[in-house]
Image (cartoon, rainbow, N blue to C red):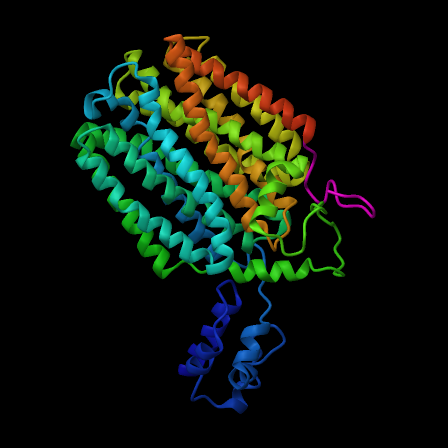
Amino acid sequence: MKFKSCVDWVYRYLHGRAPPTGHQIARGCSGFDVERAGRLDVGSGQSLGVLMNRPSEYSANLVLQHGISHNRVQFFHQLFQVLLVGLTIGMTRTVVPALAESEFGVPKNSFVLLSAFVIAFGLVKGTMNFVAGRLSERIGRKHVLMYGWLAALPIPLMIWYAPNWNWMVAAMLLLGINQGLTWSMTQTAKLDITRLEERGLTLGLNEFSGYVGVALAGIITAYMAAHFGARQGLLIFGLAVIILAIVLTQWWVRDTLPWAQAEAAKHAPGITQTHRPRYPTNISSTPTTAEIFSLMSWRDKRLMALSQAGLVEKFVDALVWILYPAFLYQKGLSLTNVGWIISFYGFTWGGSQLITGRLSDRIGRHIMNVSGMWICGAGVAAMMLGEGTVWWATAAAVSGFGMALLYPNLSAAVADISHPAWRGSAIGIYRFWRDLGYGIGALGLGLAAHFSGQIQAAFWFVAVAMGLSGALLWWLGEETHPRLNPMSDGSQG
């Protein structure tokens, strides 16, 4: 039985978990008959006897397999992690804005002050995305994920105690750290362990899990606020989610950096590939952070177009977060009805990504990204063109569907043309610009509502911005899927 346990232990690591160290192999398989072990094939063309005699050589040369099927356990652990990430931010998206005046003392129609907590969140989250990508390439994905969850622990306590709105703004600074580190790592980790042709599906599932979590949290916390009171309801919900995430991260999540390193080796010069991605050519083999930042921000027009689209689409999410609850609450809807209408946005966004992510693997990213920008903006405009619960819920769902078209596929497009050696940094910089859109968008829509004196002006500001950004993406962008638009001899990215 002990010998069988040793074999099973090795098999578990060979099929989807992080490779064991030489010390673990020597300790875990010691005391067994080497001659008998030598006759047992454990995969990768090696026997258990080889592992026992040359554990360090085995550990260094183990071939890691990419793909959802080969890594299903870790893949689903990471999906559950991003669900918890969505629940964490979602708990602030219905109750807090709707009750800002009664619970936290925000004066009525103080649109800029109301926007302050999202401005703070966006600036911090954008910065942490930038930091997370580069840091994860040095210390690993799991450590960065854990740091993100530890940063979230004080948030429910701060909301529960908050004597004024300044405490809410401070809590959002911590939420920005949490979301920047955790959401970045759950996405990067899944890209590490999956194959190129699964990239759209992977990001679709990632964002599905996250934004279903956001929608569920909005509904659950609305009911909990009605039953327990706003502060106590958020305290109970928030602590339960964050503590569960910390426990799962510590005991079940594996570091996926070795998979990224193995993929990078496959893209080394001289290695033949069927479909060569259109990686940028104006970058060194070991680029600095500044070099990658400039490439993403202006030197590569494709990556610049994707980054600006990511930034502007966050204007919509900032609007939904800040002014949808206030707008609908002022229209006389109950807090639970406000939560349900906003959930149509989240559920449509999350659920549709099960289709749109996989679809982009077949028909490409570019057309879906551009059309998504325009459809999402149309849904925002529609909120101002009608009245009634059914109309508002439908308009919210239209915006959610537009988000489902663009959200996973902007990230997939960035991943398509970012070399595995620096993909973590590229995704982090893209997410820096994207989530900076929370801060810029919140400030812009707050000023639009403030100077016009009407909340409707903020909706039109966002709708127009989405239309213009989509046009810029259509003009400067291109199809990035390597199968549909591969690098040809002599061509440049």
Q: Residue furthest front?
A: 290
Tell me which secondary structure the magenta stretch mostly adopts.
loop
- Depicted 332 relative to depicted 40: above or below: above
Please say whether residue 194 is visible from this viewpoint. Answer: yes
**Residue appearing at x 80%, y 44% in the figure:** 491
Please say whether residue 1 is visible from this viewpoint. Answer: no
**Residue appearing at x 54%, y 85% in the figure:** 49
Residue 173, located in which quarter of the rendered image? Answer: top left
- Depicted 384 relative to depicted 215: above or below: above
Residue 253, located in which quarter of the rendered image? Answer: bottom left
Q: How many marks?
A: 0
x, y percent for residue 75:
48, 53
Q: Is 311 placed left or right of 142 in the picture?
A: right
Quadrant containing the N terminus is: bottom left
Q: Nearer the viewer, residue 284 or 470?
A: 284
**Residue appearing at x 51%, y 45% in the figure:** 428
- Depicted 131 relative to depicted 33: above or below: above
x, y percent for residue 145:
40, 52
Residue range of the region highlighted in magenta in the rendering: 477-493
Residue 201, located in which quarter of the rendered image? Answer: top right
